[in-house]
């Protein structure tokens, strides 16, 4: 851990207190920088937030905790132990996948139990499943060390001979679904081990094959976890650590402008007040920062010198936060309900930009693991339906009520929540319009910029502006990409870069 003289500490203004901004603020504080973090909302966490109403507690965004080594390393960097701040609960029966024909598959943490489930669906699959794990492990190791945990400053770094050989050897840029299909013969197992791209708002038919690292982390590397008290407990732990390190946290403080002079970021304007800084790190969505916070003449680099209007975005999410009378004991903590028209569901979202006729959806019952998240005799139910980002084909003010009724019907028929409408004690709906208004997410895309082959690595928007000196980015829409663990890794890369280029003092 780096240290610096307390007398001449340089200051960094962090715009946005989501996971990326908070993780970077912790690192910068531990490195000796003076840090001011400005968050426009009343609480930190960004999309990873908490909703408390009528005795129910909901995590508003991310609900799957993977790759816990990234969070443990963050706390170790600051000289702390994560376990002293939050308790992580391992999930043994990690989730259930429900197929369109009514069959289901329970994904277990323990391989003997999982193998029994896989063999029931596809007899003789065991050797091929182990080859799948071997291939996914290889992609995970090389993907993290050579691509995810590196910031490619030049095209030459990304397209070097060694990298090209690794890309070819691992087939990392191939079609994810086709890659998975090499190991499984049945559509059911192909779907069960490709649905994980939904975590990133991607289609398995368009995502690079390197994302097979996601099921590998669930099955063999670290498994799924849940923080005691809900996912937001991790944000509370990080906020506590940040304050201990001297980070000055300003909530309800929207940044109106990044101050640029002589081609260099010099600070921010908040509530009409100019606040100087030696560097600015934006955790607000990167396209929004260039469009609304930086001067028009600043220009922008969206990876490979692309323009903002050429970017492709992830899916968005239609959300229901429901307090349900009675217990939902037939459901697991995590439940995936896949459309009987699996490919057509993704094509409607990503190709046609329309609401799917037969949606896949994800249902979470956090009170199965953490009973305090619901009153006695009731359960908290969080439902996420992948939908297109904002566009001309869906008018949420017009189409939203009918789509909500469709989702209620699916919860009754597919998820077995009988008489759901009469059992609702609390309801909150969130559409892509809310992702736009609450977090300034371009196109209301809940997961930020997409991860097509021309938007990863060097082609993804860089974390250091090419046009504005000492202007940096962290979050889902910059490198290395979306997803809570990747954003946490990105915070380390951004903080290290600021340390090299600005110096703590």
Image (cartoon, helix red, strand yellow):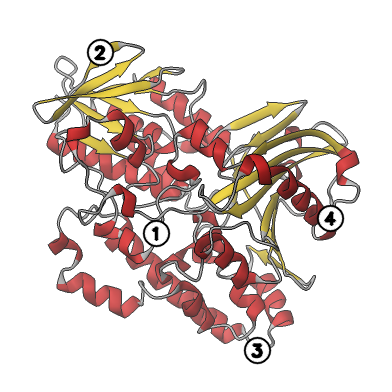
Please tell me which residue lies in front, 108 or 195. Answer: 195
- Residue drawn 50% across the image and 49% down it: 391
How far apart in space, not on screen, are marks 2 and 3 (Cα)? 66 Å
Mark 4 burial class by Cα count in 10 Å: few <14, some 14-19, many 20+:
few
In the figure, 153 relative to 212: above or below?
A: above
Residue matched to label 1: 451
Numbered disc 2: secondary structure? strand
Residue matched to label 4: 330
- Coordinates of residue 350 in the picture (x, y in percent): 51, 62
Residue matched to label 3: 124
Figure quadrant of residue 401: top right
Q: Earlier in the sequence, mark 2 or mark 1?
A: 2
- Asked if marks 4 and 2 touch (Cβ < 8 Å), the reply is no
* Nearer to us: label 2 or label 3: 2
- Coordinates of residue 126 in the picture (x, y in percent): 61, 83
* Nearer to us: label 4 or label 1: 1
Mark 3 burial class by Cα count in 10 Å: few <14, some 14-19, many 20+:
few
Residue matched to label 2: 274
């Amino acid at each position: 851990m780096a240290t610096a003289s307390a007398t001449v500490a340089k200051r960094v203004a962090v715009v946005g207190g989501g996971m990326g901004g908070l993780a970077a603020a912790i690192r910068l504080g531990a490195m000796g920088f003076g840090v001011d973090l400005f968050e426009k909302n009343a609480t930190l966490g960004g999309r990873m937030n908490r909703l408390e109403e009528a005795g129910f507690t909901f995590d508003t965004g991310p609900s799957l905790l993977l790759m816990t080594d990234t969070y443990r390393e963050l706390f170790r960097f600051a000289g702390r132990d994560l376990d002293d701040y939050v308790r992580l609960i391992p999930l043994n029966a990690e989730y259930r996948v429900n197929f369109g024909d009514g069959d289901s598959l329970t994904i277990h943490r323990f391989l003997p139990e999982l193998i029994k489930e896989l063999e029931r669906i596809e007899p003789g699959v065991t050797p091929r499943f182990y080859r799948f794990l071997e291939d996914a492990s290889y992609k995970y190791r090389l993907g993290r060390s050579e691509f995810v945990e590196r910031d490619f400053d030049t095209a030459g770094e990304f397209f070097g001979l060694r990298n090209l050989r690794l890309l070819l050897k691992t087939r990392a840029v191939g079609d994810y679904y086709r890659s998975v299909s090499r190991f499984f013969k049945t559509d059911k197992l192909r779907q069960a081990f490709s649905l994980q791209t939904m975590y990133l708002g991607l289609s398995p038919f368009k995502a690079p094959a390197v994302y097979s690292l996601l099921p590998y982390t669930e099955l063999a590397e670290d498994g799924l976890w849940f923080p005691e008290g809900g996912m937001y407990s991790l944000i509370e732990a990080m906020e506590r650590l940040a304050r201990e390190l001297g980070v000055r946290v300003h909530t309800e403080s929207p940044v109106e402008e990044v101050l640029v002079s002589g081609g260099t970021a010099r600070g921010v304007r908040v509530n009409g007040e100019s606040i100087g800084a030696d560097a600015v790190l934006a955790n607000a969505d990167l396209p929004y920062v260039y469009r609304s916070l930086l001067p028009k003449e600043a220009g922008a680099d969206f990876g490979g010198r692309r323009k903002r209007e050429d970017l492709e975005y992830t899916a968005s999410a239609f959300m229901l936060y429901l307090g349900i009378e009675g217990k939902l004991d037939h459901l697991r903590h995590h439940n995936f309900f896949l459309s009987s028209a699996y490919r057509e569901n993704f094509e409607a979202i990503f190709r046609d930009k329309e609401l799917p006729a037969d949606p896949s959806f994800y249902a979470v019952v956090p009170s199965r693991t953490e009973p305090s998240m619901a009153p006695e005799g009731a359960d908290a139910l969080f439902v996420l339906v992948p939908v297109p980002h904002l566009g001309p084909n869906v008018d949420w003010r017009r189409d939203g009520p009918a789509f909500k009724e469709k989702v209620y019907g699916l919860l009754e028929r597919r998820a077995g929540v009988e008489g759901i409408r009469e059992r609702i004690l609390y309801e909150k709906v969130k559409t892509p319009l809310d992702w736009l208004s609450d977090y300034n997410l371009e196109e209301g895309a809940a997961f930020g910029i997409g991860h097509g082959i021309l938007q990863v690595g060097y082609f993804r928007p860089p974390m250091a502006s090419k046009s504005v000196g000492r202007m940096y980015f962290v979050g889902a829409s910059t490198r290395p990409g979306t997803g809570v663990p990747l954003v946490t890794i990105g915070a380390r890369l951004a903080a290290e870069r600021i340390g090299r280029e600005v110096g703590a003092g």
